[in-house]
Image (cartoon, rainbow, N blue to C red):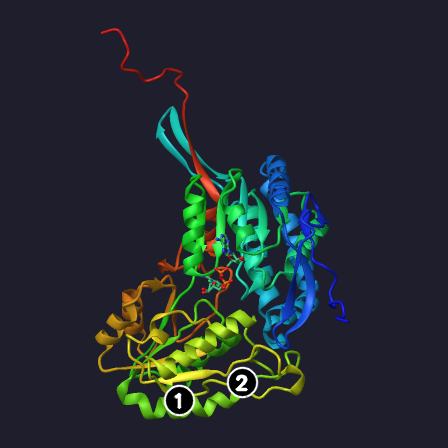
């Protein structure tokens, strides 16, 4: 007989309490390291979603009128609870997502709590103030940043609790309420986060959770009571979501996929460039939206770059996810394993790319993990721009090295894509770095670094990689709308309808 999963069932959460789904339907979330079930998750029916949205709608009236400093105090308390429980939450994130604990324990909850604290401090410190303009002695204009209403957050599976916090923090700080749907592949964090918000003093209905797959997401995005949708996921899904949201003139933020270029210039420090390329491809087993998967290297640097890169690949260490030495986990799901594997096969068999490292087959992992969704960190070299592995987002640990002759050529090829999420340059010439960054068509860029995304830094894609930004001072603007008021103290309306 099958044993029951180790975690209690995950429920929906609205009106300040966990609630079973009226559908009676559940799905199972599994540990991608060994393919064992973790928990049953309740699937929201349409009437559950309506109830969650109604709860958010009721809560909006008073939450939007709560003074920003009071809202800030509650969110700061939630950030403190998250930090206190960092290790427990990170452990669950590791089991649910397959990311090594060496990573989740220092990144996922930490960077989520940072953003919560950042926006609490921003609004508590007057960050939502409008502007005043004196027009004449007796007239002025003032503006107000008003919250939008009920907002929907839809998450991807790669940074589960971080995504939930990057969306809910500015949303709630600005006075909105939220219904959040986690990815069906990594739903475990959502109820925990809702409970922490309630414990911190968030009024009932301000943050709500519904679980389910794309159909639940689609119902949310088309709901007439929803004012805004903030979505993180694939470009193809983002297009559907934006199309559905457009129907009711909803506001949208779209954080989508990329195929980002990393440019190593001829004068770059070799060790730093190799480290950068590895971070940009193998961190989180390559499941990072901003991955620099197209690595442009000067042809003259080829022997030294390839030699050092292959030498350093021994430091990518798959293994038991709670071993502090492990820094490379499985892929997040069986579906994703099949997708990444098919790209590697396509690279070998159709693109005929030259394999420098890895390839098909599983890495060496302990026996108890053999059923997990493991893939080898893989490097193709001598790639050309027309290869499918170079053009499409794989979202796994697959690096493509592209050689170039001139910097102008590299910049041109780097920009030759419909995507524009991230880009970066490695060079010792800082003036040149700024010139190149200025020419790269991407919303998130790095110089001699890759991947860091602090609360203070607005991030969002260009082209098909997205609409709008998250984080930083700019990020709060996505959760408010403007109201302008002209005040005339003269008491006389300027009119053309006067007696001549
Ligand atoms: P996905 O598009 O398959 O799913 C994302 C979410 O959308 C899930 O919660 C899913 O249930 C929901 N969904 C699916 N169909 C829907 C529909 N019709 N209407 C509404 N919701 C629907 O993406 P994924 O595979 O979970 O995530 C990986 C992708 O996310 C990659 O492309 C990655 O680059 C991207 N990503 C982007 C960022 C960023 O900040 N730009 C961050 C993380 C991940």
Which residue carries the number 2 mark?
362
Query: Is 448 on the left-hand or right-hand side of 46?
Result: left
Corner quadrant of residue 422? bottom left
Which residue carries the number 1 mark?
356
The reply to whether residue 170 is in sight is no
Corner quadrant of residue 372? bottom right
- Residue drawn at the location 31% of the way across and 76% of the way down: 387
**Can you name the residue that lies furthest to the top here?**
499
Q: Position of residue 108 (x, y in %)?
A: 58, 66
Q: Is residue 111 above or below residue 282?
A: above
- Residue drawn at the location 62% of the way across and 51% of the way down: 210
Q: Is residue 442 above or below residue 382?
A: above
**Position of the N terminus by quadrant:** bottom right
Question: What kind of element bears circle 2?
Answer: loop
- Marks 2 and 1: which is nearer the front? 2
Residue 328 is labelled as none
Q: Position of residue 206 (x, y in %)?
A: 63, 44
Counting every numbered tag in the picture gives 2
The residue lying toward the viewer, choosing from 420 and 273, is 420
The residue lying toward the viewer, choosing from 123 and 45, is 45
The residue lying toward the viewer, choosing from 153 and 449, is 153
**Position of the C terminus by quadrant:** top left
Q: Position of residue 172 (x, y in %)?
A: 58, 47
- Residue drawn at the location 73% of the way across and 67% of the way down: 5
């Amino acid at each position: 007989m099958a044993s029951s999963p180790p975690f209690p069932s995950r429920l929906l959460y609205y009106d300040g309490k966990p609630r079973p789904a009226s559908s009676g339907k559940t799905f199972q979330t599994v540990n991608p390291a060994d393919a064992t079930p973790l928990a049953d998750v309740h699937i929201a029916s349409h009437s559950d979603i309506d109830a969650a949205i109604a709860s958010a709608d009721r809560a909006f009236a008073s939450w939007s009128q709560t003074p920003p400093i009071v809202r800030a105090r509650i969110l700061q308390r939630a950030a403190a609870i998250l930090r206190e429980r960092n290790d427990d939450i990170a452990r669950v994130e590791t089991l649910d997502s397959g990311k090594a604990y060496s990573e989740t324990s220092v990144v996922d909850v930490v960077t989520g709590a940072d953003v919560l604290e950042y926006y609490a401090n921003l609004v508590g410190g007057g960050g939502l103030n409008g502007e005043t303009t004196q027009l004449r002695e007796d007239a002025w204009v003032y503006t107000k940043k008003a919250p939008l209403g009920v907002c929907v957050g839809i998450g991807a599976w790669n940074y589960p609790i971080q995504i939930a916090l990057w969306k809910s923090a500015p949303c709630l700080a600005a006075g909105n309420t939220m219904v959040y749907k986690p990815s069906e592949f990594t739903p475990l964090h959502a109820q925990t986060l809702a409970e922490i918000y309630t414990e911190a003093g968030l009024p009932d209905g301000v943050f709500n959770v519904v679980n389910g797959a794309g159909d639940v997401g689609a119902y949310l995005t088309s709901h007439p009571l929803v004012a805004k949708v903030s979505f993180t996921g694939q470009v193809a899904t983002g297009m559907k979501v934006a199309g559905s949201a457009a129907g009711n003139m909803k506001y949208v933020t779209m954080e989508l996929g990329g195929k980002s270029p990393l440019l190593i210039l001829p004068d770059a420090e070799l060790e730093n460039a190799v480290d950068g390329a590895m971070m940009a491809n193998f961190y989180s087993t390559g499941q990072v939206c901003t991955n620099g998967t197209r690595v442009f290297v000067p042809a003259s640097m080829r022997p030294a770059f390839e030699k050092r890169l292959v030498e350093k690949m021994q430091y990518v260490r798959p293994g038991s996810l709670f071993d502090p030495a492990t820094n490379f986990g499985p892929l997040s799901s069986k579906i994703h394993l099949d997708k990444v594997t098919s790209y590697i096969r396509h690279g070998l068999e159709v693109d005929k790319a030259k394999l420098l490292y890895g390839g098909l087959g599983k890495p060496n992992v302990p026996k108890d993990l053999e059923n997990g969704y493991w893939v080898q960190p893989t490097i193709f070299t001598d790639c050309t721009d027309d290869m499918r592995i170079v053009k499409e987002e794989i979202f796994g640990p697959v690096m493509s090295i592209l050689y170039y002759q001139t910097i102008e050529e590299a910049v041109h090829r780097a920009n030759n894509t419909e995507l524009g999420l991230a880009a970066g340059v490695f060079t010792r010439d800082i003036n040149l770095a700024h010139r190149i960054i200025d020419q790269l068509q991407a919303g998130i860029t790095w110089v001699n670094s890759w991947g860091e995304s602090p609360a203070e830094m607005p991030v969002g894609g260009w082209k098909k990689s997205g609409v709008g930004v998250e984080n930083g001072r700019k990020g709060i603007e996505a959760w408010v709308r403007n109201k302008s008021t002209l005040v005339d103290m003269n008491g006389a309306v300027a009119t053309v309808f006067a007696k001549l």
